[in-house]
Image (cartoon, helix red, strand yellow):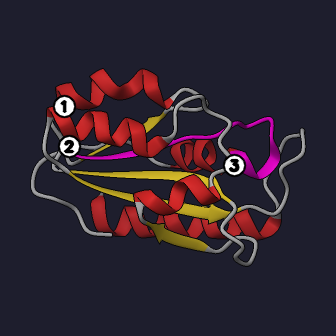
């Protein structure tokens, strides 16, 4: 991860009531926006944040969401947009790469996707231990590089 010059945005997505799918909202809750970083928890409706992101004209956007890419539980990977359709567990109605494409048609910005391999996807609250450890490491990395 590296900050762009100007405004940087972290967008998380996920459903807190689907165990590890809540990793995105957890990460957002641990971070604070600053002069160079804006943190947006899109929850299950990332399509609702498109206009806000466009109005901020960010230099850099990182989308963070739970994924199932066949990795070890709690493993984080930088994904390509084309990878997301095959590993998304999507609790949101519009896939994140489609939302990113809409944003990129309006403003040119650098976009990255981080997927976190989930372990538990059943109804319930709380993250599995492996996903929680990964989430805390990502929060530390973001603080170190952006705040």
Classify mark 2: residues with Cα within 10 Å, few (<14), some (14-19) or many (20+): few
Residue drawn at (52%, 72%) of the image? 77
Does residue 108 sit above or below 112 in this rendering? above
The mark found on residue 35 in the picture is: 2
**Mark-to-mark CA distance, 1 and 2:** 12 Å
Query: Observer-nearest residue: 19 or 82?
Result: 82
Under circle 2, the secondary element is loop
- Compare marks 1 and 2 and give the one earlier in the sequence: 2
**Mark-to-mark CA distance, 3 and 1:** 28 Å
Q: Which residues are magenta?
A: 8-21
Res 81 → quadrant? bottom left
Residue 9 among magenta residues: yes
Question: Quadrant location of the C terminus?
Answer: bottom left
Q: Which residue is mark 1?
A: 56
Under circle 1, the secondary element is helix
Residue drawn at (50%, 53%) of the image? 64
Query: Observer-nearest residue: 40 or 80?
Result: 80
Q: Which residue is mark 3?
A: 89
Does residue 86 sit above or below 13 in this rendering? below
Under circle 3, the secondary element is loop
Location of residue 38 in the rendering, given as x and y in whole percent from the top left corner = 31, 41
Q: Nearer the viewer, mark 3 or mark 2?
A: 3
- Compare marks 3 and 2 and give the one earlier in the sequence: 2
Q: Is residue 9 left or right of residue 90?
A: left
Location of residue 114 in the rendering, given as x and y in whole percent from the top left corner = 48, 62
């Amino acid at each position: 991860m590296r900050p762009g010059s100007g405004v940087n945005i972290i967008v998380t997505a996920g459903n807190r009531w689907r165990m590890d799918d809540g990793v995105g909202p957890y990460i957002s809750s641990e971070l604070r926006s600053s002069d160079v970083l804006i943190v947006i928890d899109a929850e299950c409706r990332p399509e609702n944040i498109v206009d806000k992101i466009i109005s901020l004209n960010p230099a850099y956007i990182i989308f963070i969401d739970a994924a199932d890419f066949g990795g070890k539980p709690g493993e984080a990977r930088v994904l390509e947009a084309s990878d997301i359709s095959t590993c998304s567990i999507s609790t949101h109605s519009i896939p994140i790469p489609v939302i990113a494409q809409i944003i990129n048609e309006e403003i040119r910005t650098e976009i990255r996707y981080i997927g976190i391999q989930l372990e538990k996807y059943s109804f319930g609250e709380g993250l599995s231990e492996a996903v929680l450890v990964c989430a805390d490491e990502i929060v530390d990395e973001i603080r170190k590089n952006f705040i």
